[in-house]
Image (cartoon, rainbow, N blue to C red):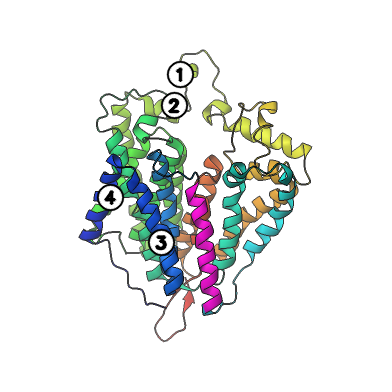
């Protein structure tokens, strides 16, 4: 197993990332080439026994997946990120079989699969591959990943290197956003999500922008910035906030802010010195966020403020009453519909994707997909889904209680927070939920002098 020594992104790597991102704006096949490289790197990792390569690709997959959706037509396979995770899981399993398997520190992965699998028989007769991939594959992959990570033993250097590879593709995302909207002067800002500034699906783009903020901040907290010059990381965070606000999609922004506050909140309670230090960081973070928000609000003629207040064109003009369903962009009606379906089919639910055609019968928009993973588990998997949702929420509390260091509790807590908050507004549409949850669950140890390794 190779020894890990963290190094920031080099100039050559940075130039390569920028050139690739710009090239994809004009030649969509570049995206296909990048994904081909990811699959080939995973196959090479299986042959060479480089499990770390597979994890680098796993960490990068959420941003790569959203990037490929932004560059429409670049990748012919929908949900390619989920298909990639299948290959990655096989590669990790083969590695553990060949190189010996450590004793698992938890068995939450097996429990998730046991709770979910029985309900898969409900609509197996009318199997719809697209609906199964869209709705359930990511959660099954999370269960498998958790079975594998329970046997992992990492150090901080390896963890930081994995997070670094996870944030690298943000360059591709930002490059394409700039290409699609080089000037904000011609953008018509309204009280809805802005597809032009997001260069595609606003919710998913805002999600990975928030993920980029979190990954960059985590590397700073671990004193291993993504590049050796720290101020570049601060500029990157500020710019990602700027682009996130411009999408007018609130979920990704709220998740990023909440996650950063989680890691700071844990870290600052270690001792008096860390309390002062991280209090200053928290204040600076919030001030920068407010300044960027104010700048974007001015650029959008104060539409951003109204958007975050939950206003729509209809409510702002008085044609419709402002309700919680309006504030949540229709998610309340989806949650209510899922709850009604669960009460009607409590045992096994209606199966993966089965709720899509039923939600409109109970007040949700027609042909509406799941946006909240917890309620989707209820409606499509019944009691087993309810228990699985409970496991997903409670396991982070158990795992955090096992950590010895406050900073590491914050790192794990922030990643769990990103996974759960993302699943609450975007279900499992991207790999973000599964990847962040799995990364948070990896046993990471520090090596203390004259002591055995202690779990971080």
Circle number at residue 20:
4
Q: What element carries label 2?
A: loop
Q: Mark 2 points at which residue?
A: 192
Q: Nearer the viewer, mark 1 or mark 3?
A: 3
80 part of magenta stretch:
yes
Q: Name the residue under label 1.
A: 313
276 part of magenta stretch:
no
Q: What stretch is highlighted in magenta?
A: 79-98
Q: Percent position (x, y) of residue 235?
A: 26, 48
| Quadrant of the rendering where the N terminus is positioned | bottom left
10 Å crowding of disc 4: few (<14), some (14-19), many (20+): some
Determine contact: label 2, label 4, CB under 8 Å: no
Q: Mark 3 points at which residue?
A: 40
Circle number at residue 120:
none
Name the N-terminal-most of marks 4 and 3. 4
- 3D distance between C-alphas at marks 2 and 3: 40 Å
Q: What element carries label 1?
A: helix
Name the N-terminal-most of marks 2 and 4. 4
- 3D distance between C-alphas at marks 1 and 4: 39 Å
10 Å crowding of disc 1: few (<14), some (14-19), many (20+): some
Name the N-terminal-most of marks 1 and 4. 4
Q: Percent position (x, y) of residue 371?
A: 57, 38
Determine contact: label 2, label 1, CB under 8 Å: yes
Q: Is mark 4 on a helix, strand or loop?
A: helix
Q: Nearer the viewer, mark 2 or mark 4?
A: 4
Name the N-terminal-most of marks 2 and 1. 2
Q: Nearer the viewer, mark 4 or mark 3?
A: 3
Quick check: can you spot residue 287? no
Determine contact: label 2, label 3, CB under 8 Å: no
């Amino acid at each position: 197993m190779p020894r890990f020594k963290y190094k920031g992104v080099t100039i050559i790597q940075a130039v390569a990332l920028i050139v690739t991102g710009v090239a994809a704006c004009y030649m969509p096949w570049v995206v296909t080439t990048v994904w081909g490289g990811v699959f080939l790197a995973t196959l090479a990792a299986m042959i060479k026994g480089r499990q770390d390569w597979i994890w680098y690709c796993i960490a990068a997959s959420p941003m790569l997946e959203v990037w490929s959706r932004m560059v429409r037509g670049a990748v012919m396979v929908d949900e390619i990120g989920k298909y990639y995770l299948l290959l990655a899981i096989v590669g990790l399993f083969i590695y553990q079989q060949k190189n010996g398997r450590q004793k698992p520190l938890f068995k939450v992965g097996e429990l998730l699969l046991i709770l979910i699998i029985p309900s898969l028989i409900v609509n197996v007769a009318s199997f719809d591959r697209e609906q199964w991939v869209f709705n359930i594959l990511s959660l099954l992959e999370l269960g498998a990943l958790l079975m594998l990570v329970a046997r992992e033993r990492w150090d901080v250097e390896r963890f930081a290197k994995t997070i670094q590879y996870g944030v690298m593709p943000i360059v591709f995302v930002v490059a394409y956003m700039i290409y699609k909207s080089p000037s904000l002067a011609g953008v018509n800002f309204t009280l809805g999500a802005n597809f032009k500034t997001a260069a595609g699906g606003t919710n998913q783009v805002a999600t990975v922008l928030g993920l980029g903020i979190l990954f960059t901040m985590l590397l700073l907290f671990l004193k291993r910035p993504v590049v050796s010059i720290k101020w570049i990381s601060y500029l990157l965070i500020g710019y990602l906030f700027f682009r996130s606000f411009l999408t007018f999609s609130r979920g990704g922004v709220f998740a990023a802010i909440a996650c950063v506050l989680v890691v700071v909140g844990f870290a600052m309670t270690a001792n008096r010195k860390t309390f002062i230090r991280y209090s200053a960081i928290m204040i600076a973070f919030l001030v920068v966020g407010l300044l960027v928000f104010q700048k974007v609000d001015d650029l959008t003629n104060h539409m951003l403020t109204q958007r975050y207040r939950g206003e729509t064109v209809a409510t702002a003009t008085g044609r419709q009453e402002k309700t919680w369903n309006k504030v949540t962009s229709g998610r309340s009606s989806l949650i209510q519909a899922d709850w009604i379906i669960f009460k009607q089919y409590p045992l096994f639910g209606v199966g993966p994707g089965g709720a899509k055609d039923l939600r409109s019968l109970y007040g949700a928009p027609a042909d509406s997909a799941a946006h909240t993973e917890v309620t989707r588990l209820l409606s499509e998997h019944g009691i087993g889904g309810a228990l699985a949702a409970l496991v997903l929420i409670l396991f982070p509390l158990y795992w955090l209680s096992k950590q010895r260091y406050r900073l590491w509790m914050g790192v794990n807590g922030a990643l769990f927070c990103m996974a759960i908050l993302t699943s609450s507004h975007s279900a499992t549409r991207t790999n973000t939920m599964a990847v962040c949850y799995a990364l948070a669950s990896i046993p990471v140890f520090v090596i203390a002098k004259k002591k055995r390794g202690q779990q971080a």
